[in-house]
């Protein structure tokens, strides 16, 4: 997903093995992921997408004016505060349980998409007619 503040930015979906970089997009109030070499296109992730950063990423702490460093390099994309309209929902959850909104990550940090979440597919439609609900088949 791409956060609401990236509505007016060109975007594409992430794919496995994508090389991403945290980026600030011109004309927006947020940050997100862009493809390395394509800084003006937001790369949208689905909840459950797993990433690995080159180094533990740095981010701005909620209440303090200095940076923090994540406990590790592996993260899972998720969305937070979905009940709050017009808020930043995109976040990363790290292996120690720390959740960091994407908008708090410092720009220029690189990561690779390890795997995308499984999307449930619908079973193929049957070509046989459906039986009435209370029919008895002999």
Image: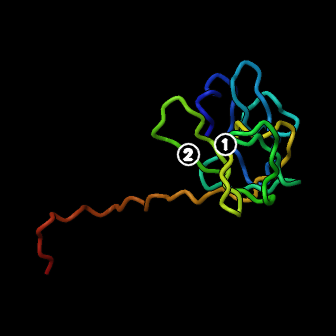
Comparing 46 with 122, the one in front is: 46
Q: CA distance from mark 1 to mark 2?
A: 8 Å
Q: Which secondary structure, mark 2?
A: loop
Q: Work out which quarter of the rendered image holds the N terminus and state it.
A: top right
The percent position of residue 5, horizontal first and vertical second, equals 62, 27
Q: Seen in the image, is 81 located left or right of residue 111?
A: left
Q: Residue at label 2?
A: 80
Q: Residue at x 79, y 59 (%)?
A: 71
Q: Seen in the image, is 71 located left or right of residue 93?
A: right
Q: Residue at x 82, y 51 (%)?
A: 69
* Mark number displayed over residue 60: none
Cβ–Cβ under 8 Å for marks 1 and 2: yes
Q: Residue at label 1?
A: 101
The percent position of residue 119, horizontal first and vertical second, equals 55, 56
Of marks 1 and 2, which one's residue comes earlier in the chain?
2
The percent position of residue 125, horizontal first and vertical second, equals 38, 58
Q: Seen in the image, is 69 located left or right of residue 125?
A: right
């Amino acid at each position: 997903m791409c956060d609401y503040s990236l509505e007016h930015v060109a975007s594409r979906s992430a794919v496995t093995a994508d090389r991403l970089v945290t980026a600030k997009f011109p004309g927006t109030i947020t940050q997100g992921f862009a493809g390395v070499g394509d800084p003006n296109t937001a790369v949208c992730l689905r909840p459950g997408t797993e990433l690995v950063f080159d180094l533990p990423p740095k981010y701005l702490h909620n209440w303090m004016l200095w940076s923090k460093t994540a406990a590790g390099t592996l993260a899972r994309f998720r969305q937070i505060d979905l009940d709050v309209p017009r808020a930043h929902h995109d976040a990363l959850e790290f292996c120690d349980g720390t959740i960091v909104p994407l908008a708090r990550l410092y720009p220029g940090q690189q990561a690779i998409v390890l795997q995308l979440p499984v999307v449930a597919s619908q079973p193929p439609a049957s070509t046989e007619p459906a039986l009435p609900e209370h029919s008895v088949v002999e």
